[in-house]
Image: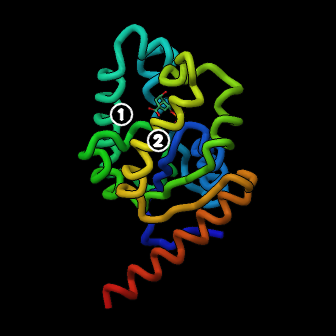
Amino acid sequence: MHLPASVRNLVLVGFMGSGKSSVGREIARRCDFRFLDTDSVIRQKYGKSIPEIFAIHGEPAFREEEHQLLLRLRGARHLVIATGGGIVLQPQNRLRLRSIGPVVWLTADEEVIWERVSRNRNRPLLQTVDPRSTIRSLMQIRYPLYREAADVVVETSTLTHQEVAHRVLLAVRVWVTERHEGED
Ligand code: S3P
């Protein structure tokens, strides 16, 4: 299933572990778009892992890199962009994301997120004494921000990456149709 021609890029937002990268790759493959992961672009620029960038340069430097990257994506075409879970923290990023393409929020239950993120240690914000409660409080802060940034919401908790990719494409098609009808 392809995206309507009016969709220049597709942007995925959501909490750590919501499947943005895996789903993004799958959508890019299906639509013949290129895939871009903001975390990997920043990792490549620094030649370091995300935990190293946070430890050496600090979180504000990382957030600035995210912001600058969004500015550079202004004229992008045919990209599926998976963003880091904290990209919505800056209000100007929330606006900017929408100007790049439809923004899809991948949601998942706290339990499912915990299941997925507890398998690896590459997320500096979760290196706390009680990562489970860190997830809970970060979700409380961020869910309203994802909601504000997103055009479309897809719940992923019980779905495979392939199923999520399919639902995202369907939901974006419906969103494009409704938006155009609204313009008439
Ligand atoms: C972060 C999420 C990470 C990465 C960094 C900070 C966050 O990306 O950008 O560790 O603030 O939620 P993922 O959402 O891909 O894990």
Disc 1 crowd, CA 10 A, few/some/many (<14, 14-19, 20+): many
Between 101 and 62, the one lying in front of the other is 62
Q: Where is the C terminus found, in terms of image quarters?
A: bottom left
Q: Are marks 2 and 1 in contact (CB under 8 Å)?
A: yes
Measuring 37% from the left and 55% from the top, which residue is drawn there?
Answer: 149
Between 121 and 96, the one lying in front of the other is 121
Badge 1 is on which residue?
A: 66
Q: Percent position (x, y) of residue 167?
A: 64, 65
The correct choice, above or below, for 86 with respect to 149 in the image is above
Residue 83: assigned label = 2
The quarter holding residue 127 reads top right
* Distance between the alpha carbons at the discs numbered 2 and 1: 9 Å
Q: Where is the N terminus found, in terms of image quarters?
A: bottom right
For the question of whether residue 84 can be seen, the reply is no
Measuring 53% from the left and 34% from the top, which residue is drawn there?
Answer: 135
Q: Percent position (x, y) of residue 124?
A: 50, 20
Left or right? Give the position of 54 relative to 22. Answer: left
The correct choice, above or below, for 155 with respect to 37 in the image is below
Q: Farthest residue in the bottom direction?
A: 184
Residue 151: assigned label = none
The quarter holding residue 118 reads top right
Measuring 31% from the left and 50% from the top, which residue is drawn there?
Answer: 94
Residue type (three-letter) at the residue carrying disc 1:
Glu
Disc 1 CB within 8 Å of nearest ligand 1 atom: yes
Residue type (three-letter) at the residue carrying disc 2:
Thr
Name the N-terminal-most of marks 2 and 1. 1
- Count of numbered marks: 2
Measuring 34% from the left and 45% from the top, which residue is drawn there?
Answer: 73
For the question of whether residue 9 can be seen, the reply is yes
Disc 2 CB within 8 Å of nearest ligand 1 atom: yes
